[in-house]
Amino acid sequence: MALHIYNSYTRKKEIFESITPGYVGMYVCGPTVSGESHLGHARPYISFDVVYRYLTYKKYKVRYVRNITDAGHFEEEGREAEDKVSKKAQIEKLEPMELVQKYTNLFHWAMKQFNCVEPSIEPTATGHIVEQIVMIEDIISKGYAYEVNGSVYFDVKKYAASHDYGKLSGRVIDELLDAGNREDVSRELDGQQEKRDAADFALWKAAPPEHIMRWKSPWGEGFPGWHIECSAMATKYLGSNFDIHGGGMDLLFPHHESEIAQSTICNHSAPVKYWMHNNMITINGRKMGKSYNNVIKLTEMFSGNHPLLTQAFHPMTVRFFILQSHYRSTLDFSSEALSASEKALKRLWDAYEVLKNLPVSNNTTPTDSELDSKITNWLNEFEIFMDDDLGSPRVIANMFEIAPIINSLKDGLIPFDAISASTLQKMKDSFQVYLEDVFGLTNINDQNNELLNPIMQLLLDIRKEAKANKDFATSDKIRNQLTQLGILIKDDKEGNTTWGVA
RNA sequence: GGUCCUUUGGCCGAGUGGCUUAGGCAAAGCUCUGCAAAAGCUUCUACAGCGGUUCGAAUCCGCUAGGGACCUCCA
């Protein structure tokens, strides 16, 4: 079966065929580094990380570009107030790049916690001002943009006359064009009056005197508009036609719609073959977002320091939580749901560890061929499900079908010759590939360090001796006090004992 | 107001015409165990409401009700 992905542009699942066989160009809208990332932000980066990993698994050579938006249209908290106190000395004033650096570092740290693969190229908007200016000049020269008072706007009406503006987002162009005349949608936007039409969007904005981030341009000092950076950087690194563009559904309009318009004018063709959009993480049924005042920052997730959280959550729990739902469904957050994921992941990973240690025999004929073929079928479905628009939840479900079998093999509840050696090997291989390589999950019990392991072994030995002597007071003391310390003791049927962090 | 989406068991969530309608968490019982935990087994079986299409619908269509997203920066 070939990989199928849902294309937001055509609103259909399509067979994935890369433009250049064997190679994939993928662009994902990155963070605006004017503040701390929250749980909602984690979703696209984890979802598209899995896309990247899966494409790599499918032997594609992927160039993955994810930008850092560090210029132009962001209004970092507190800056306005700071700007007004301009009598401060230079060193005391808020330096925008200082903020950008701080939140970029924090973002990178979070991505590392999530075990997200670093993009091939991570371009910044401030590093590509020239490219953006060149692109804007090109659009002007082609007659699809105009300058007013040092700002440049894209002429949507003209573009829409010959192109399908609104197709991606399902917008009705006539409504957009007369939107400015309607009271219910008119908002306070800078320069609304100088635009030819309310639907026009800025390519370049003249900087008011108090605006700190500013660059020289053919139209005076200013900063790039809302959407041009992605078009400029995607074109630069992936060409005028590339395979996948990803981002959150909330970017569909106006951001991605405008990207299509800009790039189409510059490059004479639609830029992207497959548009992929992840759905939102909600909280009490509502999108997590700054304007709703319901965000949980990632640092808060990991520390548990938030009124809505009953505990801290490991980054891998968050990652697993996200993978347990399909990327195009909304995912409702709750502390309970996260706790459930935490336990589930622990159980699954424990089974995986057990699986890794199961000895492979040379048994060629399974005594329980029905079970053997059931397992084979579940394993084969891993790829089938992923090929069907990244069905990670169904892959995980299959893993949970297999987990009890793994434990039963270990405990001798299922005899070893029930399944063939090749099936067992396939289990080992498939679990490793999907759990680690494709889903990017790691062992949550990373406390297993060189110092602790021998100490634990010592304690377990003492406990074993005590049990052998029927000195249950001692054995229970060790077990109970370790439990209090958050370490779980597990005895198996053969009298072996393992331990893990609760 | 416009466009679009969504409504699955106590909770979270797969699943788009019939095949056993996932899986996880919670709960209960049992097995194992010195007692626990872990593990295993079993139970709890749902598709918002109404109507239609069909031999057959959670799955397609219509209506009603609830929820949501976008139309403005937004993952």
Image (cartoon, coloured by chain):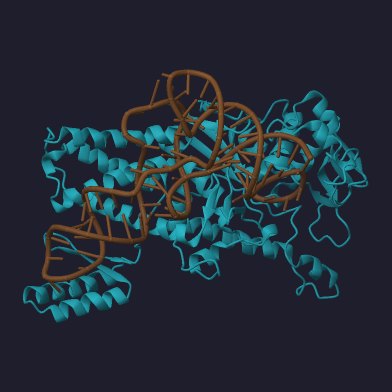
Chain colours: A cyan, B brown
Figure quadrant of the C terminus of chain A? bottom left
Q: Horizontal and vertical percent for residue B29?
A: 22, 59
- Compared with residue A123, is residue A177 higher up or lower down, i.e. above or below? above
Q: Is residue A114 rendered to the left or right of residue A453?
A: right
Q: Horizontal and vertical percent for residue B43?
A: 28, 48
Front-lying residue, A274 or A238 = A274
Q: Is residue A173 visible?
A: yes
Q: Quadrant of residue A219?
A: top right
Q: Is residue A179 rendered to the left or right of residue A226?
A: right
- Compared with residue A216, is residue A173 higher up or lower down, i.e. above or below? above
Q: Can residue A444 be seen in this view?
A: no
Number of residue marks = 0
Figure quadrant of the N terminus of chain A? top left
Q: Is residue A178 rendered to the left or right of residue B66?
A: right
Q: Horizontal and vertical percent for residue B5?
A: 60, 38
Q: Horizontal and vertical percent for residue A417?
A: 11, 40
- Compared with residue B27, is residue A19 higher up or lower down, i.e. above or below? above
At 33% across and 41% down in the image, what residue appears?
A398
Front-lying residue, A317 or A265 = A317
